[in-house]
């Protein structure tokens, strides 16, 4: 009888780059560092959907600087993109990984791309899932296309939540309800919004205030030209219902020479939820072929 593959779970705070980052490791095998979306979310919405990959890979989840269960005792001057990139590099070094497989979703894609530009010799492969664009103009356009999907009922529901005592107290569960009104329109099948478990931390209000300082780096940018320096195998996964596919994904694909673009039909911003089996198949195929 074949012995079942051993998996393990390791979690805790790791002191890196002047702060403490929460991390969680699941599975054994070739490591993949996973960068969540946001800014301000945490790894929890990804974990249950990506966990099947732990049968073959060591998945390293972490909460970004001043996010989730990571420390919020940070100087506002440290809330800069460069520090987020150095956090990734410090995690890599602390875990004894010479070259990273980076998997990133949404806003995390911007961090992964910038890390690959800054540290090309430390990247083994990139997997960008519905990544945000490489320019502020593109992101603004995608956000406007999403805003156009909002209905009158959405506006009424948002107003009713904002007027509650729970929202005034910034209770995480109420903030999550508000966020899901918007996230619903990022699903092709809106009913699947119930499968998105954001699980915001109790300190989410403090986190969101801190992360406002990222605006200094996100007001006006375009680094498409810099993407041409990325030589590592790169996989771009998008859902066809996500405005980012046309606005961001295809231009990133054109900019990164060794990239593959896979667009999943009838799917939005969360392909690991809406088309989980297809998503996992695409990732596993890429990981097997990238060598």
Image: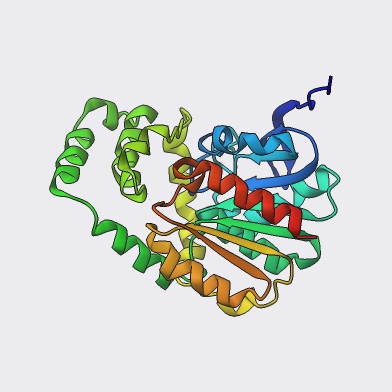
Q: Residue furthest front?
A: 1
Q: Residue at x 37, y 64 (%)?
A: 142
As drawn, 27 above or below 289: above
User: Of 143 and 14, which appears nearest the observer?
Assistant: 143
Side of 149 where 231 appears, left or right:
right
The answer to whether 77 appears left or right of 189 in the picture is: right
Residue at 51% from the left image edge and 48% from the top image edge: 37
Q: Is residue 107 above or below residue 192?
A: below
Q: Tell me if 121 is positioned left or right of 226 in this view.
A: right
The quarter of the picture where residue 30 lies is top right
Tally of numbered discs: 0
Of residues 139 and 7, the one drawn nearer to the viewer in this rendering: 7
Residue at the spot 61% in from the left edge and 48% down from the top edge:
281
Camera sees residue 80: no
Task: Find the residue positioned furthest to the bottom.
Answer: 225
Question: In the displayed structure, would residue 65 be above or below residue 44?
Answer: below
Q: Residue at x 13, y 48 (%)?
A: 152
- Image coordinates of residue 278 in percent, x first then y, are 54, 47
- Asked if residue 244 lies left or right of residue 95, the reply is left
The x and y percentages for residue 219 are: 44, 67
Measured as percent of width and height from the top left, residue 267 is found at 41, 51
Tell me if residue 210 can be seen.
yes
In the rendered image, which quarter is residue 13 located in?
top right
Q: Quarter of the image for the N terminus: give it.
A: top right
Judged from this view, the residue extending furthest toward the top is: 1
- Structure colour scheme: rainbow
**Which percent across, then down, holds residue 187?**
36, 47
**Quadrant of the rendering where the C terminus is positioned:** bottom right
């Amino acid at each position: 009888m074949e012995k079942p593959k051993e998996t393990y779970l390791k979690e805790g705070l790791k002191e890196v780059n002047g702060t403490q980052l929460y991390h969680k490791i699941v599975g054994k095998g070739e490591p993949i560092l996973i960068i969540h979306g946001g800014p301000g979310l945490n790894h929890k919405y990804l974990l249950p959907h990506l966990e099947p990959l732990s049968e073959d890979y060591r998945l390293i989840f972490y909460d970004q600087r001043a996010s989730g269960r990571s420390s919020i005792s940070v100087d506002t001057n440290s809330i800069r993109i460069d520090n987020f990139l150095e956090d990734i590099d410090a995690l890599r070094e602390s875990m004894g990984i010479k070259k990273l497989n980076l998997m990133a979703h949404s806003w995390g894609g911007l961090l992964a791309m910038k890390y690959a530009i800054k540290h090309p010799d430390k990247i083994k492969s990139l997997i960008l899932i519905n990544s945000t664009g490489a320019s502020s103009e593109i992101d603004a356009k995608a956000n406007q296309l999403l805003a156009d999907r909002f209905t009158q009922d959405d506006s009424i529901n948002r107003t009713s939540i904002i007027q509650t005592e729970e929202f005034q107290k910034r209770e995480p569960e109420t903030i999550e309800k508000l966020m899901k009104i918007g996230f619903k329109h990022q699903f092709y099948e809106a009913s699947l919004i119930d499968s998105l478990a954001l699980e915001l931390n109790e300190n989410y209000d403090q986190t969101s205030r801190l992360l406002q300082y990222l605006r200094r780096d996100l007001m006006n940018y375009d680094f498409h030209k810099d993407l041409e320096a990325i030589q590592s195998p790169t996989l771009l996964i998008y859902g066809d219902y996500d405005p980012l596919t046309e606005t961001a994904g295809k231009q990133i694909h054109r900019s990164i020479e060794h990239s593959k673009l896979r667009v999943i039909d009838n799917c939005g911003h969360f392909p690991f939820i809406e088309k989980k089996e297809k998503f996992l198949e695409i990732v596993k195929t890429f990981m097997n072929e990238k060598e």
